[in-house]
Image (cartoon, helix red, strand yellow):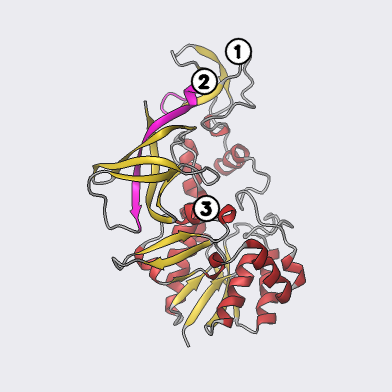
């Protein structure tokens, strides 16, 4: 019987993943990843976030009901280095990071898989809405979930071939309604848990406050400038802003102003009109390919520049070994440095990378 470690958050999806794998005949071990940094101040979120202490109580209860062994594994250091430090550094550089992608790649997969293999498991599993498939070219990729509105492949584009070969994602083949129906059979309490939202280590969603508290210092104020460099006013620190933002700027321009660019070197936030936020071309680096080994020549695909974004037709090609150019057929709103761009062919991931900049 093959052994699989299931990352259990105490929520609906990971609990059902454990149940489904047990039903399929796997030797299932439940694990909650301890990533919170301060157990006294960490919020025990009622909304079912994956870093609260409440996750342990719910996950342990579900494991008992499923009659599977359950452990809490400490990943504080890995989470600190690969997620929180990265998150803060990216904002300091004027970029908008995606901590969930970093967490998936370096903590939930790299670290958890490493420890799972050490205890004799062949696979790890999560409650993500995605499907692992093996293609005719012998490469692994991710196919979109059966529940498209819940699809989480975008946040998993960075997984390696090795990691995918040791990954099971049973939830991705089901609709969300069916998953909740299965959860009711397991435990009525978790079945009614809402899905977790926002960034788990910033439950109040105030990124700028978190960064300033983390650094122990206020972000340096600087200038709002227009597209021609004319000073429009003072900003509160670049971590308070992101590309495309309109609200909360505190500027009286006589018309709506939008954040078009953030320049960390000059500590300036560039303001323009709504049309200035749109673009068709971007450069991306830190590339990871799934369905193909490498990109030769041009390829017509569909690209997605943020989790909630609808993918759009584009042409991709390599500029050099780790720099890709993507040109969209239609202009995209708020191409944001630091965010991921992920490419699809039909419902499968070709690959993706981190947006470096919009090319004007």
Residue 131 inside the magenta-drawn segment: no
Circles 1 and 2: CB atoms closer than 8 Å: yes
The residue wearing badge 2 is: 271
Q: Which residues are magenta?
A: 264-290
Tag 2 or tag 1, which sits nearer the N-term?
1
314 up-or-down from 248: above or below: below
Residue 253: mark: 1
- Alpha carbon of mark 3 to alpha carbon of mark 1: how far? 36 Å
Q: Quadrant of residue 177?
A: bottom right
For the point 65% across and 84% down, which residue is it? 67
Residue 198, position in %: x, y? 62, 48
- Alpha carbon of mark 1 to alpha carbon of mark 2: how far? 10 Å
Asked if one can make out residue 25 in the rendered structure from this viewpoint, the answer is yes
In front: 306, or 349? 349
* Mark 1 neighbour density, 10 Å: few (under 14) some (14–19) many (20 or more): few
- Alpha carbon of mark 2 to alpha carbon of mark 3: how far? 28 Å
Q: Quadrant of residue 69?
A: bottom right
Q: Say what secondary structure mark 3 lies in.
A: helix
């Amino acid at each position: 019987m093959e052994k699989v470690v299931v990352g259990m958050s105490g929520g609906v999806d990971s609990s059902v993943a454990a149940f489904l794998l047990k039903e399929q005949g796997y030797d299932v071990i439940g694990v909650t990843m301890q990533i919170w940094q301060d157990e006294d101040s960490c919020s025990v979120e009622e909304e079912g976030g994956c870093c609260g202490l409440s996750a342990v109580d719910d996950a342990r209860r579900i494991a008992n009901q499923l009659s599977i062994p359950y452990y809490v594994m400490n990943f504080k250091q890995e989470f600190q280095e690969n997620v929180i430090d990265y998150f803060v550094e990216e904002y300091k550089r004027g970029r908008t990071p995606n901590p969930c992608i970093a967490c998936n790649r370096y903590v939930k997969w790299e670290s958890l898989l490493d420890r799972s293999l050490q205890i004799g498991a062949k696979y790890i599993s999560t409650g993500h809405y995605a499907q692992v498939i093996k293609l005719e070219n012998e490469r692994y990729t991710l196919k979109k979930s059966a529940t498209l509105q819940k699809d989480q492949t975008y946040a998993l584009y960075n997984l390696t071939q090795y990691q995918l070969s040791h990954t099971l994602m049973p939830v991705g083949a089901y609709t969300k309604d069916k998953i909740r129906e299965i959860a009711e059979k397991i435990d009525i309490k978790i079945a009614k848990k809402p899905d977790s939202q926002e960034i788990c280590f910033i439950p109040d969603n105030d990124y700028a406050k978190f960064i300033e508290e983390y650094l122990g210092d206020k972000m340096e104020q600087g200038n709002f400038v227009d597209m021609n460099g004319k000073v429009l006013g003072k900003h509160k620190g670049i971590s308070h802003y992101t590309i495309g933002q309109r609200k909360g700027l505190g500027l009286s321009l006589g018309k709506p102003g939008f954040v078009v660019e953030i320049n960390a070197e000059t500590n300036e936030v560039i303001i323009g009109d709504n049309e200035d936020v749109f673009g068709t071309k971007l450069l991306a680096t830190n590339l990871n390919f799934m369905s193909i080994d490498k990109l030769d020549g041009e390829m017509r695909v569909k690209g997605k520049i943020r989790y909630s974004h609808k993918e759009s037709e584009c042409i991709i090609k390599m500029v050099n070994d780790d720099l890709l150019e993507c040109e969209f057929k239609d202009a995209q709103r708020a191409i944001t440095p630091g965010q991921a761009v992920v490419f699809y062919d039909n419902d499968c991931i070709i690959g993706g990378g981190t947006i470096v900049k919009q090319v004007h």
